[in-house]
Image (cartoon, rainbow, N blue to C red):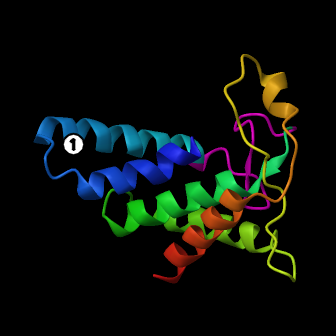
């Protein structure tokens, strides 16, 4: 979900070669996806590793990709301004996960494809390079 949220904005920005119908389909899919995410944000601004299960842990790198994608979507005119508030809450939640030494906390140790929810509940949490990178991308988007 998070990689799609960020990645589709990158794709749509560069996809000058797709026809109007394809572009519209992808854009509308992105908008519906963002609308669904909007309803699933935790009180602290982050998103749960299992999006629709508030007993699963909140995950920083996924939140960062979602925040960056929502901010890019607003900036590109794909999403309305209400999504900026969702993204800003996410950015605040992300900032709360950054230690004094710059380590980004609450990043899953990789999310391989699982066959059930239990798989995702049991993914370890470790500082990971992609967590740092996605956090930097989200913060850079927030500064624009």
Residue 93 appearing in the image: yes
Query: As drawn, which residue projects farthest toward the front?
Result: 129
Q: Residue furthest top?
A: 115
Q: Which stretch did the figure color magenta?
A: 38-55
**Residue 110 higher or lower than 102, as above or below:** above
Image height of 133 relative to 37, above or below: below
Q: Residue at x 30, y 63 (%)?
A: 77
Q: Give the tally of numbered discs.
A: 1
Please give the name of the residue rendered at 62% of the width and 65% of the height, measured from the top-left corner: 133
Instruction: State the quadrant of the N terminus.
Output: top right
Q: Quadrant of residue 93?
A: bottom right
The answer to whether 40 is drawn above or below residue 136 in the figure is: above
Determine if residue 81 is in view.
Answer: no
Q: Is residue 44 magenta?
A: yes
Q: Quadrant of residue 55?
A: top right
97 is within the stretch colored magenta: no
Residue 44 percent location from the top left of the image: 79, 61
Q: Would you say the magenta stretch is mainly helix, strand or loop?
A: loop
Mark 1 — residue?
23
């Amino acid at each position: 979900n998070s990689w799609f949220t960020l990645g589709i904005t990158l794709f749509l920005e560069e996809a000058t070669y797709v026809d109007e119908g394809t572009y519209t389909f992808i854009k509308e899919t992105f908008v519906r996806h963002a609308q669904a995410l909007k309803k699933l944000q935790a009180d602290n601004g982050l998103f749960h590793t299992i999006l629709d299960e508030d007993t699963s842990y909140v995950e920083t790198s996924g939140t960062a990709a979602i925040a960056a994608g929502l901010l890019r979507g607003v900036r590109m005119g794909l999403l309305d301004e209400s999504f900026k508030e969702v993204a800003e809450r996410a950015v605040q939640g992300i900032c709360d996960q950054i230690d004094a030494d710059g380590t980004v906390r609450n990043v899953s140790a990789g999310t391989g494809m699982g066959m059930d929810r239990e798989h995702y509940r049991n993914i370890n949490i470790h500082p990971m390079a992609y967590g740092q990178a996605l956090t930097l991308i989200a913060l850079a988007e927030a500064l624009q």
